[in-house]
């Protein structure tokens, strides 16, 4: 009985090998032709194919789909099924996938992808705003209680001895003389620092958001410490105007970078039903879109800082520019996009 069963299995295996060989010999030429055409158009462009070759692509694609259907139904070689699945997927993506040029992709990013990513991060953005506010209050109170904290928060090499002990006249001159001296150096440092903070706040979000939180708090502390020094000399409003020109854009960008880092960190810490890698990948798509936009905002802030700090000295004008930029970003990210998409 065992001998008969083994003979039957041998016959079946031989028949299957013959069927597979026959299946390959009848259809493999079409698969290879389809694969060769796809290789050419993917590496170059449709112009690399002749007209008849372009017309043959849909027919070869349907033939490959038919072969895949037969291979699956008859349980043929798994390697062959995997090959046909890959070939059919490539064909589908080329024939029916969306292919856009650079200009439409850029337009889509600014019109939809970036604002949608920022709106998706609204919870984390509020947390980032709260952290920066807490940091600013802490920096203000620490320097008010003990002026030595100023050097601990803002590097002494940058302050150059012109911190809490500087006179009101010196500090006022720094606000309105085009930026020479301490405040000019602080402005350059602040821009560079904020770019670094934005990148690190995003990149270090993988460490369960802890470094991101600390960086946002530190950024707030620096602002609070500087504000305390100027406020103690009766120049808090004037400093606010100087900072507002570029600060509303710059600080908003920092908060968005922090939000992006928090999204990744919290998804890794609490992945839900997904694996940690899958959760991080999903969060990373939203966070990455937001971060590309953050770099654009920081470029805007750099232009505003470079021009506004040197040429605009009126407090009202400074506040108007800063407030106008903040209103623009809020409308762009939330109001206009929500109305356009019928969101509530």
Image: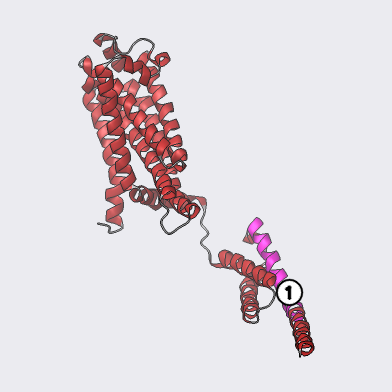
Asked whether the viewer can see residue 273, the reply is: yes
**Chief SS of the magenta region:** helix
Q: Nearer the viewer, residue 6 or 163?
A: 6
Q: Residues within 10 Å of mark 1 (few under 14, many from 20)?
A: some
Left or right: 214, with 244 as reference point: right
Q: Is residue 261 above or below residue 59?
A: above
Residue plotted at (31% across, 41% down) = 127
* 106, above or below 221, in the image: below
Instruction: Tell me which segment is drawn in magenta.
Output: 22-43
Q: Which residue is mark 1?
A: 28
Residue drawn at (46%, 43%) of the image: 206
Q: Does residue 55 lie above or below 234 as drawn?
A: below
Q: Position of residue 186 (x, y in %)?
A: 38, 20
Point out residue 236 in the picture as x, y percentages from the top left corner: 22, 21
Residue 269 vs 161, above or below: the answer is below
Q: Position of residue 296 (x, y in %)?
A: 42, 39
Q: Quadrant of residue 195?
A: top left
The residue shown at (69%, 69%) is 79
Q: Quadrant of the C terminus?
A: bottom left
Judging from the image, what secondary structure is the residue with disc 1 in?
helix
């Amino acid at each position: 009985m065992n001998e008969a069963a083994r003979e039957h299995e041998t016959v079946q295996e031989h028949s299957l090998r013959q069927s597979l060989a026959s299946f390959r010999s009848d259809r493999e030429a079409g698969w290879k032709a389809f694969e060769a055409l796809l290789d050419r158009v993917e590496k170059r462009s449709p112009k690399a194919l002749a007209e008849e070759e372009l017309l043959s692509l849909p027919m070869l694609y349907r033939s490959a789909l038919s072969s895949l259907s037969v291979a699956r139904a008859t349980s043929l070689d798994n390697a062959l099924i995997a090959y046909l699945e890959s070939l059919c997927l490539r064909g589908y993506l080329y024939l029916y996938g969306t292919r856009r040029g650079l200009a439409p992709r850029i337009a889509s990013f600014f019109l939809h992808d970036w604002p949608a990513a920022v709106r998706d991060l609204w919870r984390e953005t509020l947390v980032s705003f709260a952290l920066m506010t807490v940091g600013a209050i802490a920096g203000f109170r620490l320097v008010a209680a003990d002026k030595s904290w100023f050097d601990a928060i803002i590097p002494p090499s940058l302050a150059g001895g012109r911190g809490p002990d500087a006179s009101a006249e010196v500090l006022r001159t720094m606000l309105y003389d085009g930026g020479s001296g301490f405040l000019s150096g602080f402005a350059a440092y602040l821009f560079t620092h904020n770019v670094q903070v934005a990148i690190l706040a995003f990149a270090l979000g993988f460490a369960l958001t802890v470094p991101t939180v600390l960086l946002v708090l530190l950024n707030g502390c620096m602002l609070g410490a500087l504000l305390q020094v100027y406020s103690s000399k009766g120049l808090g409003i004037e400093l606010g105007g100087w900072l507002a020109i570029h600060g509303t854009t710059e600080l908003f960008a920092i908060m968005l970078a922090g939000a992006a880092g928090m999204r990744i960190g919290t998804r890794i810490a609490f992945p839900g039903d997904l694996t940690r890698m899958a959760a991080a990948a999903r969060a990373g798509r939203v966070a990455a879109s937001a971060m590309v936009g953050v770099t654009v905002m920081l470029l805007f802030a750099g232009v505003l800082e470079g021009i506004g700090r040197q040429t605009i000295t009126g407090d009202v004008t400074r506040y108007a520019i800063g407030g106008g930029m903040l209103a623009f970003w809020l409308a762009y990210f939330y109001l206009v996009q929500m109305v356009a998409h019928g969101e509530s």
